[in-house]
Amino acid sequence: MTPDIHDIRGAPVIVGAGIAGLMTALHLAPEPVIVLSRTPLGTDASSTLAQGGLAASLGEDDSTALHLADTLAAGDGLCNEAIARRVVGALPSAVDHLVRLGAPFDRDLDGKLRLGLEAAHSRRRIVHAAGDATGRELFRALLAVARRTRSITLMEGMAAHRLVVAEGSIVGVLVVLHNGVFALPTRRVVLATGGIGGLFHDTTNPLSSFGHGLALAACAGAEFADLEFVQFHPTALDTSRRPMPLVSEAVRGEGAVLVDEHGHRILADMPGGELASRDVVARAISDQLAAGHCVYLDARQCLGPKFAKRFPGIDAACKQAGIDPAVEPMPVRPAAHYHMGGVAVDAEGRSSVSGLWGCGEVACTGLHGANRLASNSLAEAVTTAAWVAQSVAGTCAGWQWPRLPAMLPLRPDPSSIRQVVSNALGIVRNGKALRDAIAKLLPIAVGETMAADAALVALLIAIAALRREESRGSHYRSDFPGRDANALPSRLTLCTAFENAVALSWQASERSSW
């Protein structure tokens, strides 16, 4: 079918309507902007699942210098220090802006913002709302303002299928609605599509979050950065429910401890204990599970009957599974949670493709390095959205439209490749498993099935993981357990990934013929 063309007068198009997308749209006001949401607003968005909160140096004993130091330490040598300094410096005013927009952050009796503590933070600096429902409450506040803003057009049930590129620049977006395709001509597109957790069996993300924005950017020719770094949250509630309910790091910040089936504390001898960085805690739990033990998070001593009031969402998820965290420990295991890598962008969110920006988890600004510091994700989204919007607004509008081939898009479905991804790209990786995964993913990625886009994203991550022959942050190679002192942030394009995958396939066929 040939797409119908809808003239939007060159307005920018934001793909994704979570916190990053809505914040960008609000900062663009009063300039007209189109926001695409694949599902009804607020459903299937990682933003609404965020529990812990937003990190900002607001306490009297805190400073941006301390927040920066914690961010760099967690990033394990790969943070872009200039970006990190800019983000943490902008956060106090960003929090003030959110309050003015109606964000209902929790406060103490004296009216001051209540600050929580999370892993690898040296101070209490986590701003939260409704206890453990920060993402949901922040999203609600932003959506209410967006609905009242006449310059913002929210288009629900519409999925971006492909970005259209002419002479190296974005010229439009192909959008799917009820199996039909129409075209939005624009020279300005912002990706705000979230992460990749849906590629894995065990994840806290919506199962549809397979890296849709990465697939769009890849096919448009964009460059990626640090794709190998996938953060596994140490404490997802270990039940059959998918996505897995998250047991926020803030629970450990209040004093909860990790124990085995005998009640022995498993991190007693680890520096930082339960508040060590996420990659360290996740690997420790993974090792316990691999050895046949069970792992529980025990909040009985530190919170007990106060648990339900401090963490009402987690309490409800536990009780739905037949667990009362006030009187019994919670079974936990690591789950894919956040992608540090993404579309390589500059300080204003611009990608390597003219007319394409990234904001939020889909982008790699360099803030997180090899391992994101807790609650720096919402912090990144709300600060960088302003810079992305300023850059978009300062870019020339207007449009042109090339001839398009007939096409019938398929609804993407990552379910058939989850086992391959979970086996090869989990907490512990090795070269053989990565090469085997690449061999399985390549024919799917270049095919025309519902798994093609998801396989393409997984292939990119697997190639990046194979190329990083060291262990750093969230990327752990059992065949390269050491840390390379000269390691740099990685860069990759779809073209290079395909070249690498084909070369590996050729090498494998050569070996099998000997």
Image (spheres, rainbow, N blue to C red):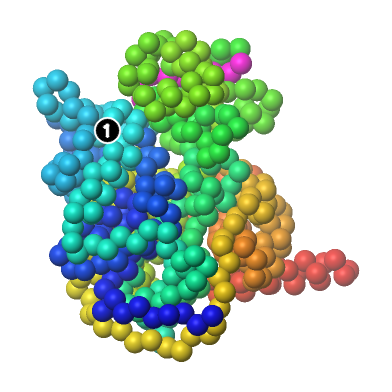
Indicate yes or no whether the magenta region holds residue 258: yes
Q: Quadrant of residue 126?
A: top left
Residue 218 x %, y %: 49, 69
User: Badge 1 is on which residue?
Assistant: 129
**Amino acid carrying mark 1 in the image:** Ala
Q: Secondary structure at mark 1?
A: loop
Residue 459 x %, y %: 60, 62
Indicate yes or no whether the magenta region holds residue 235: no
Seen at 37% across and 14% down, the residue is: 303
Q: Quadrant of the N terminus?
A: bottom right
Q: Quadrant of residue 434?
A: bottom right
Q: Nearer the viewer, residue 96 or 341?
A: 96
Q: Where does the magenta region start and end?
A: 252-261
Q: Is residue 317 left or right of residue 381?
A: right
Residue 100 x %, y %: 13, 44
Q: Quadrant of residue 11?
A: bottom left
Q: Nearer the viewer, residue 284 or 380?
A: 380
Evaluate whether residue 493 shows in this view: no
Q: Would you place residue 170 above or below residue 150 in this image?
A: below
Point out the residue furthest to the left here.
110
Q: Would you place residue 58 above or below residue 323 in this image?
A: below
Evaluate whether residue 316 shows in this view: yes
Residue 473 x %, y %: 48, 45
Seen at 63% across and 47% down, the residue is: 422
Seen at 52% across and 68% down, the residue is: 179
Q: Would you place residue 275 above or below residue 97 in this image?
A: above
